[in-house]
Amino acid sequence: MSVKVSVVIPVYNPGEYIEDCISSLLRQSLPEDEYEAIFVDDGSTDATPARLDEIAAAHPNIQVIHQESSGWSGKPRNVGTAAARGEFVMYVDNDDWLGDEALERMYRYGVENGADVVIGKMAGKGRPVPVELFRVNRPRASVSDAPLMDSLTPHKMFRREFLESNNIRFREGRRRLEDHVFVVETYLRAANISVLSDYLCYYHIKREDASNAGFQRFDPVGYYGNLREALDIVEQYTEPGKLRDSMFRRWLRNEMVERLRGNRLLSLPEDYRQEIFTEIRGVVTERFGPGVAAGMQPTQQIVAALVADDRLADIEELARWEAGIKPVGRLDSLGWDGGSLKVGFTAEYEVSGLPMTFRSEGGEDLLAPPLAEETLATIEALGVSTLAPVDRSKVDLVVRERSTAAEFFQPVDFTRERIPGGDDATFRQELRATATIDPETAANGAPLGKGIWDILVRISSCGWTKEARLGSVRSDQVEEGRRGTLSGSPHRVVLPYWTEPHGNLSLDVDLSTSRIDRDVRVLAPEDVVVGDGRVELPLPVFVDPAAETGTVALRFKAAGVAAVRTEGVLTAQAKGAVLTAELPAGLLPGHTWDMGLGLPSAKRGKPRWTPLPTALLIADDGTVTTGAAGTPSPASAAAAAKAAAAKPVAAPRKKTSFPSRVAGRLKRSLFG
């Protein structure tokens, strides 16, 4: 069969970090004869070349090209592309990895939609990745109707014939932003671009040693010189106007304004701040017309105007205020509604621990930064808008898998509430929301995978987009709704729980932790009802009355005999569920039978057992009572009592005085 996808991986001294990349390539669902991996070793001096040769010798669809060091990723990618045989070329960095079905899904999606470029959903471990771009699948996208400019890294799939016929190559040599130049040209020349958002395709990783190229301190002169090359590409393939301005705005916002805000600026040494500021100002004054900054949020426009007017000191003052801004969320309600978890919450921005306030003036809502009068006067003189578009504020609830950083937006209904301040001119804004998390569709229409899913609130307002964990601040009644449930087919447990020590809300999907044990082990002996050959016990688990009744296993274990088990049926109750099971025939009299709960696990394919703190005590005559787990069996308890009664009582020892005991020990030591 012809090769569908060629994966090109530039390699330079990755050490152990390349192992995850290699493993993910070997796990691909696409048959081995339908894809190839081309590692281009760019002069590595560690053990990587030998490791790659070993892998290539064992796998015919993997090849290694060794070359002298070129200093950056551009040349290795070009060399790999020239050697590629696939219909599509996929670029992967040597410290990142792919989802197991990434190549198969991206290839199929690209063919179905006639795409020249296919962008697969990304997750960032310690690295920022696009968010808005992956809200939904976008089979036909362009820079004019989708936020493609949020994604300028090369970790995408490109039709090889499209690259060759248009002679699109990476810039070579030691340079920054060569991927921006390459990707932007493909965006502007592609017949179609497809965005696949319902499967996590690419894991973008920050190495623990922080030695990824993108995390190194850069030379501002070279960096912004390379950035101008990306601007040149836009000018070559667009006309002056809204589209060009919107594309330029991406670099003004991300590579310039955002570097000069909050802690990102304040954490830099003062001399380095000045270097970066000087180069940014050069690009702003040389290349950007007024329409570029005009499309940004007010706070971003303020920074851009201060850059153009050469006012670094005022930017630093603004940064000190913005450094204190953070989002906060309060969990108001929690509970299952059918198969979905309803999460009610309130969110707003705080500044230095106090609610952010705005002011009303002349019928308009305005920002109210506590800046010096001179700085405020400068901003006003520059004619920059300080409008606060609070009527466009929004809030999202996101679930993020802890080990992979995969994240998905959940459906949210919210209202914007104005709360008057201490005078008629000021107010604060709260966003009051209810989100719906359906474990079977929460991953962009697919089920949430096994793992720990953290719950986050993300607020977008007035030029800030920030996120925070939810749950550490919560109302008293939410604990009552914090119940696990059986979800999906086959059933698996989905459990909301509080993290330690911060008390944030997370979801344990398919028993990835032992948190459920804490909930079920509160069962007391008096809660268990035995009669008519059945046992009933309450469980803190939600059961949807309208759904198919779930079954849970019970296991009974006694010392010296084989364990027996049975299946129980869960039925809904007001504050949880009751488990009803027939007592199995193998429960022998004269024993204490400790009980275990077998919760279903889709991943394991068999129950996962949790010991319960309760037991059935079956007397010799068959009478059944309940007690604590570990209670001696009725037979052993009776035998122990009988033995104690038959044992003769020993005569009490005669007590001797302390001096006599000392004298006796001394005599034995001297003479005996």
Image (cartoon, grey):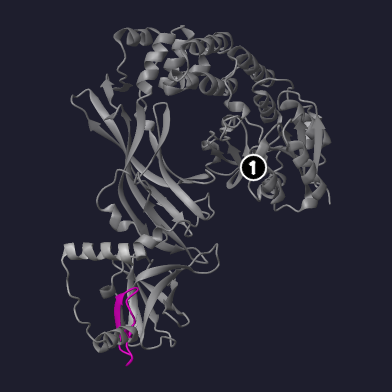
168 or 478, nearer to the observer: 478
Residue in the picture at 27% in, 22% down: 359
Vertical placement of residue 409 versus 641, above or below: above
**Residue drawn 37% across the image and 70% down it:** 612
Q: Relative to the observer, which residue lies in front, 108 or 407? A: 407
Tell me where residue 279 sits by quadrant.
top right
**Up/down of 264 relative to 8, above or below:** above
* Magenta-highlighted residues: 618-634
Q: Position of residue 634 (x, y in %)?
A: 32, 85
Q: Is residue 492 magenta?
A: no
Q: Can you say which quadrant of the picture contains the C terminus?
A: bottom left
Q: Is residue 521 visible?
A: yes
Q: Is residue 638 left or right of residue 570?
A: left
> In terms of image quadrants, where is residue 234?
top right
Q: Position of residue 95 (x, y in %)?
A: 64, 37
| Residue drawn at 35 percent across, 83 percent down | 534
Place of residue 159 in the rendered image (x, y in percent of width and height, measured from the top left): 75, 38
Left or right of 17, for residue 471: left
Asked whether the viewer can see residue 159, the reply is: no
Q: Residues within 10 Å of mark 1 (few under 14, many from 20)?
A: many
Asked if residue 629 is among those painted magenta in the image, a careful observer would answer yes
Name which residue type carries label 1: Trp
Give the image quarter of residue 639: bottom left
Q: Residue furthest bottom?
A: 621
Q: Nearer the viewer, residue 215 or 562?
A: 562
- Exactly how many numbered labels are in the figure? 1
Left or right: 413 with respect to 221? Answer: left
User: The residue tagged with tag 1: helix, strand or loop?
Assistant: strand
Residue 164 screen position, x and y as percent? 80, 31
Residue under circle 1? Answer: 97
